[in-house]
Amino acid sequence: MIRRQFLTMSAAALTLSPLPAHAAYEAVTYDRTLPRALRETGDTVIYNFRTSWSWTCRMKEEILADLLRENPGYRRLTFVDVDWDTYGPSEWAERRMKVRRQSTLVAMKGADEIARVENDPRKHSLQGLLDAALAA
């Protein structure tokens, strides 16, 4: 009985205090013309395939915001938020980027992939991706 009450109260607490819809990091919203334009600039780009309903996506956004505060050098990277519900089933996401699920980050320099993190909201994994992107 106590266990059931604890679980009920825990679920209620999570419902009453959701994470913010968007974390505090600057990102460009994806549109179909963006990948070509960004490839031509030669900038290093972090594509964040995300959804508004995924807890893992929200956790990653908070961690990214923390990492950007800790290391201002990461601000040299271009972040692009890609709405998985809209663009996940697209040819670009599935065939060209080979992204199979939401909660995926892909670091690109030009047409070359530098690093990828899939469904892994651990700080050291995301930091590794950002460090690899900066080193490219």
Image: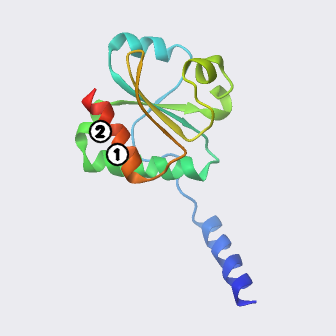
Mark 2 lies on a secondary structure that is: helix
Which of the 4 image quarters holds residue 132? top left
Which three-letter amino acid code belongs to the residue tagged 1?
Gln
Looking at the image, residue 105 lies above or below residue 20: above
Which three-letter amino acid code belongs to the residue tagged 2?
Asp
Looking at the image, residue 38 lies above or below residue 87: above
What whole-number distance in Å separates the C-alpha atoms at marks 2 and 1?
A: 6 Å
Quarter of the image with the C terminus is: top left
Residue behind mark 2: 131
Q: Is residue 82 left or right of residue 132?
A: right
Q: Is residue 112 left or right of residue 73?
A: right
Say how the picture is coloured.
rainbow
What residue sits 39% from the left and 52% below the top? Answer: 123
Q: Residues within 10 Å of mark 1 (few under 14, many from 20)?
A: some
Residue 133: image location, x then y, percent: 32, 31
Q: State the residue in front, 97 or 54.
A: 97
Which of the 4 image quarters holds residue 101? top right
Mark 1 lies on a secondary structure that is: helix
